[in-house]
Image (cartoon, rainbow, N blue to C red):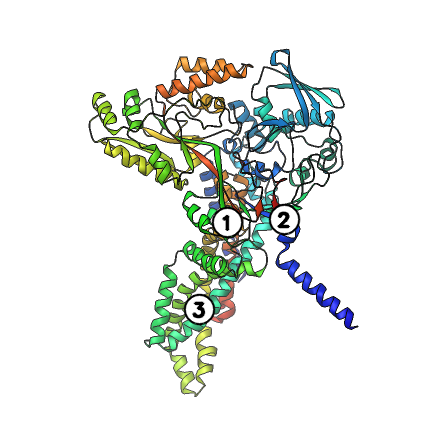
Amino acid sequence: MKKTLTATAIALALTATGFAAPALADGKITVSSPQDPGSWDPIDTFLINWASLATNVFEGLTYRGPDMELVPALATSWETLDEGMRIRFELREGVTFHNGEPFNAEAVKFTFERLLGEEGAKGPQQANYTSIKEVEIIDETTVDFHLTQPDPVLLTKLAGYGAMIVPPQYIAEVGDAEFNIKPVGTGPFKMTSYSPKVGASLAANEDYWGGAPELSEVDYRFIAEPSTALAELQSGGVDVVIPPSVPVGMIPTIEAAENLEIISTPGPTVTALRFNTGNGITADENVRKALIMAVDRNAIVDTILAGQASVIASFQGARSFGYDESMEPLPYDLEKAKALLKEAGVEPGASVEINTRGNDATFNEVAQAVAAYLSMAGVNATIKPYETNVLLNDIIPQGKTGEMFQQSWGGWTFDYDNTAYAMYHTGQKWNPYDSDAELDAMLEKQRPMTDQAEREKVLQEIAAYAADRALEMPLYNMNAIYAINKRVQNFEPAPDNRLRLDKVSVE
Amino acid sequence: MAGFLLKRLAQAIFVVVVVTLIVSVAVRMTGDPALIVAQGATDITEADLERIREGLGLNEPFLKQYLATLSGLFTWDFGRSFLGGTEVSTLIAGALPATLLLAFSSLLVSIVISIPLGIRAAIRRGKWEDQVIRILSLVGLSFPNFWLATMLVLLFSITLHLLPPSGMTGWATLVMPALTMGVILTATNVRLVRTSMLEVMQSQYVMVARAKGLSERSVLYKHALRNSAIPLITFLGLQFGGLLGGIVVVERVFNWPGMGSLAFDAVAARDYPVLQSVIMILSTLIVMVNLLVDIAYGLIDPRIRTE
């Protein structure tokens, strides 16, 4: 009797400690993510916070990790044939989906037929994969992608978002609505529960072809407010806070805490103040150059951004395909700026309006610094913020901006074509003012090129040309800033928020 | 009574229709949801956007879209969210109880604090206790709720590690949000209880009650408090509306998965079905609470019933 009591007491004590610290015992971490994408179906959404979870659940034929290298995933190798019009993939054998269904050529064909068919037409992903004409099954483990035109970025696109391979039988069984909330993939983690707007839980996929993950569980909590996410981190409620929830201003607080640290890496987002090349004093190229030279961008990065950014020379970061190391930003030279302005006939006291995204607190500080620098060159800048969506979808496309306007941009493919085409090609939505036949020709020329070295050269030429015409004041490439609890080991910061957690462990 | 109720009901329906109509029209003037759904997509063309719009049902006539939402009040089918296609009814089934729980807890906090303090201030009118209570209520009134929320989190979560800073996982997570909302309500309610008590205490029937030789306790709670409750109940009814408005900020700070958070996200994403449904349900609720307040008058004060 006494023995039983003691045993019960011990059991109770154990249970109690178990309750107190389940995370430590089980190898579990909690991640704070700013947004619930609403659906986990790869073809439904384009939110990066879909990717910050779903990269653990789904896989594509290729994979691009935090080092930005494109490596085999569900395809073991590939070969480009017929001058870029056909790509043959050898598929990985012995892989199963979380529900036990086998991964094979049939699943690949099904995935892309779904993406490019009626189901995909309702979502935003289809537009990205229109270069695929059809997928042909050669045998159980070989497929041919037939293309409508060579697509140099396709292999990268196959590593993310809409190209994630989905299970045909499962979707046929449960239907699309159920698949949205109970996703099944081949990735290192499987989703065990999802509660809309609250969170989701993942459990290790012990049969993962790349080896079972270190962690047994990962919880995601959707926390929209950055300060709340950081309060949770500080009080131990979450272990990882992902971008963009770590404001630069909070970095010192986190670094001061013994158990927390900041891990950052250059991200895809670049920020520039683009010029209204159609009206106002910024219609003059020399004035635009003067305005760039009047602003000390290095000082802005060092002071306002706590060094968590790098100054850029063109509208792309160092990781972008098309980046040219040898290209230097215009120097900060107040005297030269004043001289250029005088030459262009701009009287001291001339005014410019800067449009910003009102909810971007950090950038509004940057804009104030820019305005202060411009005033030293004799230009009065007023800042007029707009709600992000209004600025992006109304003010800029309709050409209703002031002389300068914020554009923060960066595609997950890290390909300069993505930015340059949208920003500089005549008639593009975010290019309401400028039309340059030479620039258009270069932009069009590089698109079908399959020789990547040659295409890179053209992209570099485009960057140089745009800088030469001073189409924007290039500011900086912001880091992707993660704040983590130090008990999280082997954490590699993903530049593009595509967080993969299978190598992560806890102390 | 029946005629009175019918009239109020007609007013209520009118209010809900007007409010939802304004919100539905206004949100459509500020941006294209298809663009937001497609944000981040490369090479998006007008044809792609058109396809997405078609899929979202944006090409239907406005009145049809609006009526589809409105009919949700009766069918509980509000359509699907633009963001991922979750059924709006599922989202609301999760968020509405969360918001109601928070709203009623806040009211409760406020009632529990404000009535004793208000009475105390009234009977000690002009004395130091009264002054302290009045100053405290002024301080409480001056707190912006997000500031108070942040301070509570700093104190109880980050410094003392007593309460979780956010989420909705049991009573511990309810404490700070309910306190934040409750304290701010309390500030006004204390003053209301005090004034209303003072007024009643000077009335003739209280004098008569005293003259009859009733105990002070009996005078206070049986005669004075019951009579001073009328303005308080009206005010609580009105406050409930304000509460649901103010809850947006508090829910966001505490990551409380309620209607406020839902509305906030829906505005940012131009998620019409979610936004319209949330506003419709909240306005219906507010109108209904006010209706209940009117009925409650009748129960507390028999004179109103006969009017």
Give the secondary structure at mark 1: strand
Image coordinates of residue A23 in percent, x first then y, are 62, 52
Whether residue B13 is visible: no
Which residue in the protein does label 1 denote? A260
Labelled pair 2, 1 in contact (Cβ < 8 Å): no
Which residue in the protein does label 2 denote? A28
Q: Circle 1: is it few (<14), some (14-19), or many (20+) Cα within 10 Å?
A: many
> How much space separates mark 2 and mark 3, taking CA atoms?
44 Å
Type of residue at label 3?
Answer: Ser
Have a look at marks 1 and 3 and say if they share a chain: no
B239 over B281 or under it: above or below = below
Type of residue at label 1?
Answer: Leu
Q: Circle 2: is it few (<14), some (14-19), or many (20+) Cα within 10 Å?
A: many
Q: Residue at x 50, y 58 (%)?
A: B157
Q: Which circle marks residue A379 in the picture?
A: none
Left or right of residue A244: residue A470: left
Type of residue at label 2?
Answer: Lys
Image coordinates of residue A372 in percent, x first then y, are 28, 37
Q: Quadrant of residue B47?
A: top right
Which residue in the protein does label 3 denote? B114
> How much space separates mark 2 and mark 1, taking CA atoms?
17 Å
Q: From the viewer's perspective, is the residue at label 2 or at label 3 nearer?
A: 2
Have a look at marks 2 and 3 and say if they share a chain: no
Extreme right residue here?
A: A1
